[in-house]
Image (spheres, helix red, strand yellow):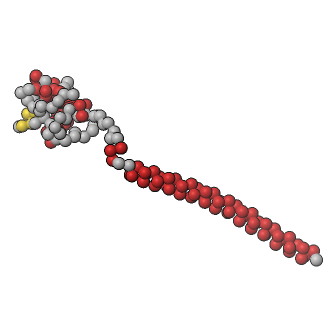
């Protein structure tokens, strides 16, 4: 009989190991299920929030106040637009062209000198690029590579 008891004990040991393995797997599945339920809840909350925001009238959404940032694009000129909406480098160019020295128009090399830049090709060409960008956006007009100020409010 001891051989039958030995077989039963061996079988019991195998089943206990299987039960332990299945419990570990069940714990892993439960953890994955909890995480999936949390993700589902966050998505549902986000959908509800977006639906609420989109349901609000457009006037309730406040536009952020934007100020000029170095390296920002030159905006298209509109009636009453102040030079202060331009990036600082462009504001300096406009201020020099609006000054007494710039009234007759300036070439880019003269403009570079007036801005305190070295009159080397790299600086002059960079300045020429910015001046052309202002012209393309209806900023100070430039004719025959001579740039002049346009009546732009200084505020």
Q: Nearer the viewer, residue 86 or 144?
A: 86
Q: At 75% across and 63% down in the image, what residue appears?
A: 20
Q: Quadrant of residue 94?
A: top left
Q: Nearer the viewer, residue 131 or 83?
A: 83
Residue 69, image x, y percentages: 29, 35
| 132 over 100 or under it: above or below | below
| 144 over 21 or under it: above or below | above
Asked if one can make out residue 133 in the rendered structure from this viewpoint, the answer is no
Q: Quadrant of residue 16?
A: bottom right
Q: Residue furthest right?
A: 1
Q: At 56% across and 58% down in the image, what residue appears?
A: 36
Give the quadrant of the C terminus: top left
Q: At 88% across and 72% down in the image, what residue appears?
A: 6
Q: At 8% across and 29% down in the image, what residue appears?
A: 105
Residue 132, image x, y percentages: 15, 39
Give the quadrant of the N terminus: bottom right
Residue 27, image x, y percentages: 68, 59
Q: Residue furthest top?
A: 100
């Amino acid at each position: 009989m001891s051989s039958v008891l030995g077989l039963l004990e061996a079988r019991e040991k195998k089943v206990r190991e299987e039960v332990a393995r299945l419990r570990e797997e069940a714990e892993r599945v439960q953890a994955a299920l909890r995480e999936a339920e949390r993700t589902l809840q966050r998505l549902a909350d986000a959908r509800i929030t977006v639906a609420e925001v989109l349901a609000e009238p457009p006037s309730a959404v406040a536009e952020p106040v934007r100020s000029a940032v170095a390296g920002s694009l030159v905006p298209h000129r509109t009636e009453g637009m102040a030079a202060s909406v331009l990036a600082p480098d462009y504001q300096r160019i406009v201020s020099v062209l609006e000054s007494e020295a710039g009234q007759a128009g300036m070439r880019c090399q003269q403009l570079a000198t007036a801005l305190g830049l070295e009159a080397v090709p790299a600086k002059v060409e960079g300045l020429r690029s910015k001046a052309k960008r202002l012209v393309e956006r209806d900023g100070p007009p430039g004719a025959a590579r001579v740039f002049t100020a346009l009546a732009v409010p200084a505020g």
